[in-house]
Image: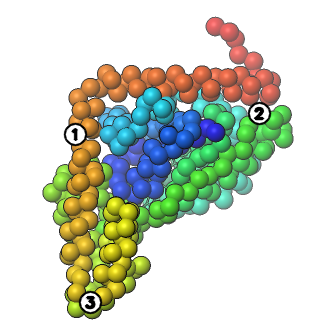
């Protein structure tokens, strides 16, 4: 089974990205052949500062490595290391109706948030379909917001296969258990809402943000509803097995204050992510080694992409010179 996923280097990664995407990527490396890439072409739809894009791209690689991605198991690479992806995007666009892309909710959401409606933003799902299909990926682990894109990818694979011949396999989405991780204000944690707890943020600043997580004003001497609490939602993700059930009971009885739960959360954050800060710094001090990891990952991925592209070109009658 081949697993593939991508993370955009569009900002500093946060707990939503980790529990929503990266955690399961890393876990899956023990069970399957995994390809993970840094979706820098996608990020050009939002980041148009070359220095910043380079820095954010390098940061995602460091975050993956610090959090335990094993480059001997999973292939880690940049989307742009595989130029065939852009070629396939064009070919898919010729068999895909405009109506399919017009139905993409993420495009409409992004426009509503004030992003420029560029052709790149509009055809974003075509590039994503190409990312997935070019490696004949079976399973695509993502957050809930990306499922529609995978369904569109299934459609595009079908359009191509029906128009020409059976080249692509049908990918399936795989959802993680943490559907939506709340931010410090209770909305979905997202870099565009300025409500994040970053994976490798300044420890004091992150502690402050945790202590500021929005709660209701139920006093200490009254029972509280864990299901409606942002702090509890994060505790559930971060506590060792069994501890969340204890907190749940404490919430339901009088005597527990939200400050106490937040303090525990800050402690867990520091234990878990703080412990990986040194590993991240270690990789950051060896940029050539990181580049070697990306190069080796790209080599593995590109071998598959080149083979699939040869099949695609043959299926649709595109001839290229052997130079
Ligand atoms: P952001 O909303 O911060 O811009 P992205 O859209 O770049 O994040 O998301 C990258 C990945 O992380 C996606 O797979 C997405 O589903 C997941 N993700 C992002 N935020 C959350 C969240 N708050 N809860 C769960 N998953 C999330
Ligand atoms: N669109 C995804 C996101 O914003 C990133 C992405 C790009 C991706 N290409 C992909 C995810 C292919 C899975 C498979 O999170």
- For the residues labelled 2 and 3, the Cα–Cα distance comes to 61 Å
Q: Mark 1 points at which residue?
A: 278
298 w.r.t. 123: above or below = above
* Whether label 1 touches label 3, CB < 8 Å: no
185 w.r.t. 85: above or below = below
Residue 62 versus residue 266: which sits nearer the camera? 266
Residue 179 versus residue 103: which sits nearer the camera? 179
> Disc 1 or disc 3, which is closer to the eye?
3
Is label 1 within 8 A of ligand 1 (CB to nearest ligand atom)?
A: no
Q: How crowded is mark 1: few (under 14 residues within 10 Å), some or many (20 or more)?
A: few
Q: Which residue lies furthest to the left in this view?
A: 204
The C terminus sits in image quarter: top right
> Disc 2 or disc 3, which is closer to the eye?
3
Q: Earlier in the sequence, mark 2 or mark 1?
A: 2
- Can the viewer see residue 16 in this picture? yes
Q: Name the residue under label 3.
A: 254
Looking at the rendered structure, the number of numbered marks drawn on it comes to 3
**Image quadrant where residue 102 sits:** bottom right
């Amino acid at each position: 089974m081949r697993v593939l996923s991508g993370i955009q280097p569009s900002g500093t990664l946060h707990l939503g990205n980790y529990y929503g995407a990266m955690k399961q990527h890393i876990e899956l490396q023990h069970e399957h052949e995994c390809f993970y890439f840094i979706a820098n072409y996608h990020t050009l739809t939002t980041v148009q500062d070359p220095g910043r894009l380079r820095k954010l791209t390098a940061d995602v690689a460091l975050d993956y490595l610090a959090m335990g991605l094993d480059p001997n198991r999973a292939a880690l690479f940049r989307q742009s290391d595989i130029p065939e992806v852009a070629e396939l995007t064009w070919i898919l666009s010729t068999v895909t109706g405009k109506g399919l892309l017009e139905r993409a909710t993420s495009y409409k959401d992004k426009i509503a948030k004030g992003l420029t409606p560029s052709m790149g933003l509009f055809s974003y799902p075509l590039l994503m379909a190409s990312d997935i299909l070019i490696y004949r990926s079976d399973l695509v682990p993502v957050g809930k917001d990306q499922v529609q894109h995978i369904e569109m990818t299934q459609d595009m694979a079908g359009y191509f296969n029906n128009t020409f011949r059976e080249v692509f396999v049908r990918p399936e989405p795989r959802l993680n258990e943490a559907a939506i991780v709340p931010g410090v204000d209770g909305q979905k944690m997202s870099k565009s809402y300025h409500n994040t707890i970053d994976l490798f943020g300044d420890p004091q600043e992150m502690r402050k943000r945790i202590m500021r997580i929005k709660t209701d004003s139920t006093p200490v001497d009254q029972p509280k509803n864990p299901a409606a609490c942002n702090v509890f939602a994060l505790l559930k993700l971060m506590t060792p097995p069994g501890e969340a059930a204890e907190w749940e009971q404490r919430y339901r009885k009088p005597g527990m204050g939200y400050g106490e739960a937040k303090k525990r959360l800050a402690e867990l954050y520091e234990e878990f992510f703080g412990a990986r800060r040194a590993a991240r710094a270690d990789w950051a001090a060896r940029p050539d080694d990181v580049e070697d990891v990306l190069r080796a990952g790209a080599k593995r991925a590109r071998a598959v992409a080149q083979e699939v592209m040869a099949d695609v070109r043959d299926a649709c009658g595109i001839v290229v010179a052997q130079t």
